[in-house]
């Protein structure tokens, strides 16, 4: 069978939408479908999803993508070898194993309702905010699943009762989807992968298993936790009642780890994904590199049960593309996200305006959940084009903050540079179609930015993992990046160093203005 007759499906479950993409054996997409789902904001700082709505979006996307690929003449029914899955990380679900029903809405990764739990733990534990960094690589933060689970155990009677009765199952979105896709009640497989498990604050980065001391300290019962597997292995088969029964789920990664694989990031190479937030990861190889500059030590990927584990330094930015959505949905400055490039291009600078989108606090490298958004430097000269350009710059400044910390943590030996001594940042995600954004990013970094021909590398990474597990691709084929570089668009910096330094100093001043604003009353 030729490569064009072999197919791998990729289920990409993101923060605002679900999509299913079918790739042929040459890693070319031949059919896809995407569905947006509802975001719930019950209170300020709270963000939830309906797990059942997400399930239905999965069903629709798989069926419609299959229909499209078949209509275009591809024999997917006979050629589909496996499915890979990638998902929004940290988002937490608890459900009943006997009914299959969620016991509460999914609490989304950017939700900050657990702030008081975080403060309490920081005061009580001898290590304070960094108490679990030694085992998990993560600080105590509203970001991670363990804190969301603690909130559910403390505040939702149905969750407490199910745990006491032995009827509760916990999982991130990957676990919820796999359990349902493999049969649900009575038959569903309760598993997660190492990359998603690494984002709970409960997994030991060295043993790749749940850390018993952490579970004891937090009072989380081990029985409700899923089994941890690698990123590339046959997990189980799709059950009857779904569009592709019998097809194996053979790959699973958190979205940022999938993007690393889709970008073929080897040791010393970094990528930045621009979505709702922005996420920058640097592959540190088989070494766990601790951060002294506000980053997370995390897992990159483990491509098989017996494969070596690759680790990473990560900087997570809560609000990136979400700030553009805010301009569109809350302020009405633009009618669609794609309009921001044209609007921002109407001015050559922000006119001294700096925007810091600390809507729910700041993640890396600041870790300030008391921060709130600010827009400073406004004068009568300021117009909506200046605001739009300041929003784009805010995304790039935040990425620069993270990369500066990465350079300090990894050191010269931890980074790969080209023959000109330049550190290349690989970029992906929907916002990277914006050429102005990419040029601003290169200018503020002072280094080239590399955009691949296919910017949807998250879905591609999940497909790679599944294809690797079932023998469609080899690691050598996946990591042969020469051909990918030839098809990429490279943005080179053109901003003078003195201008760059002045702008960065002004940005840091703006960031400092966001601190200690969470308690502002109306």
Image: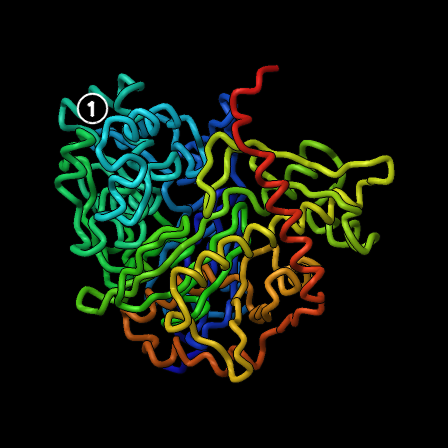
Q: x, y percentage for residue 414?
A: 38, 70
Q: x, y percentage for residue 308?
A: 22, 69
The extreme right residue here reads: 381
Displayed quadrant of residue 429: bottom right
Residue 402 lies, with reference to residue 512, above or below; the image says below
Q: x, y percentage for residue 264?
A: 42, 71
* Residue beneath the point at 36% across and 51% down: 296
Judging by the rendered image, the residue that carries numbered circle 1 is 162
Q: Nearer the viewer, residue 68 or 500?
A: 500
| Residue 170 visible, this angle | yes
Q: x, y percentage for residue 189?
A: 21, 46
Q: Nearer the viewer, residue 272 or 138?
A: 138
Secondary structure beneath label 1 = helix
| Residue 181 visible, this angle | no
Residue 288 lies, with reference to residue 522, above or below; the image says below
Q: Is residue 362 left or right of residue 87?
A: right
Q: Is residue 355 left or right of residue 368?
A: right
Residue 218 lies, with reference to residue 478, above or below; the image says above
* Residue beneath the point at 66% across and 51% down: 393
Q: Nearer the viewer, residue 476 or 365?
A: 365
| Badge 1: residue crowd in 10 Å (few <14, some 14–19, many ≥20) | many
- Work out which quarter of the rendered image holds the C terminus and state it: top right
């Amino acid at each position: 069978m030729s490569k064009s007759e072999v197919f791998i499906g990729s289920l990409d479950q993101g923060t605002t939408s679900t999509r299913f993409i079918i790739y042929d054996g040459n890693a070319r997409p031949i059919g896809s479908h995407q569905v947006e789902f509802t975001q719930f904001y019950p209170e300020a700082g709270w963000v939830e999803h309906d797990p059942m709505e997400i399930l239905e979006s999965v069903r629709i996307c798989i069926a419609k993508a299959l229909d499209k690929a078949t209509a275009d003449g591809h024999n997917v029914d006979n050629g589909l070898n496996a499915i890979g899955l990638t998902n929004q990380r940290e988002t937490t679900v608890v459900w009943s194993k006997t009914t299959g029903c969620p016991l509460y809405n999914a609490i989304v990764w950017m939700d900050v309702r657990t702030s008081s739990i975080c403060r309490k733990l920081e005061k009580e534990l001898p290590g304070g905010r960094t108490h679990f960094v030694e085992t998990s690589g993560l600080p105590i933060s509203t970001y991670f699943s363990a804190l969301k689970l603690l909130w559910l155990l403390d505040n939702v009677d149905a969750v407490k009762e199910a745990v006491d009765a032995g009827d509760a199952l916990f999982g991130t979105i990957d676990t919820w989807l796999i359990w349902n896709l493999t049969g649900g009640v009575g038959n569903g497989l309760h598993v997660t992968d190492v990359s998603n498990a690494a984002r709970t604050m409960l997994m030991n980065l060295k043993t790749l298993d749940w850390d018993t001391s952490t579970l004891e300290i937090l009072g989380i019962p081990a029985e409700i936790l899923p089994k941890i597997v690698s990123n590339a292995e046959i997990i189980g088969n799709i059950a009857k009642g779904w569009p592709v029964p019998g097809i194996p789920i053979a790959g699973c990664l958190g979205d940022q780890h999938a993007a690393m694989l889709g970008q073929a990031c080897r040791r010393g190479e970094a990528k930045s994904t621009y979505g709702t937030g922005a996420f920058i990861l640097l592959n540190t190889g088989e070494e766990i590199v601790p951060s002294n500059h506000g980053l997370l030590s995390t897992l990159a990927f483990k491509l098989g049960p017996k494969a070596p584990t690759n680790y990473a330094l990560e900087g997570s930015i809560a609000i990136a593309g979400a700030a553009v959505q805010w301009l569109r949905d809350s302020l009405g400055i633009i009618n669609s996200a794609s309009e921001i490039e044209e609007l921002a291009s109407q001015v050559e600078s922000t006119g001294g305006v700096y925007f810091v989108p600390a809507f729910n606090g700041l993640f890396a490298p600041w870790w300030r959940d008391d921060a709130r958004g600010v827009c400073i430097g406004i004068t009568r000269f300021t117009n909506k084009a200046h605001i739009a350009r300041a929003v784009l710059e805010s995304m790039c400044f935040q990425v620069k903050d993270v990369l500066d910390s990465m350079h300090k943590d990894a050191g010269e030996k931890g980074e790969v540079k080209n023959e000109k001594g330049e550190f290349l940042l690989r970029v992906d995600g929907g916002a990277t179609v914006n050429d102005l954004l990419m040029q601003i990013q290169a200018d503020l970094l002072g280094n080239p930015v590399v955009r691949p021909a296919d910017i949807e590398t998250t879905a591609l990474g999940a497909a790679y993992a599944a294809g690797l597990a079932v023998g469609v691709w080899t690691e050598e084929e996946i990591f042969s990046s020469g051909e990918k570089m030839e098809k990429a668009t490279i943005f080179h910096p053109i901003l003078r160093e003195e201008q760059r330094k002045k702008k960065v100093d002004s940005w840091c001043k703006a960031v400092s203005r966001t601190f200690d604003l969470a308690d502002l009353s109306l």
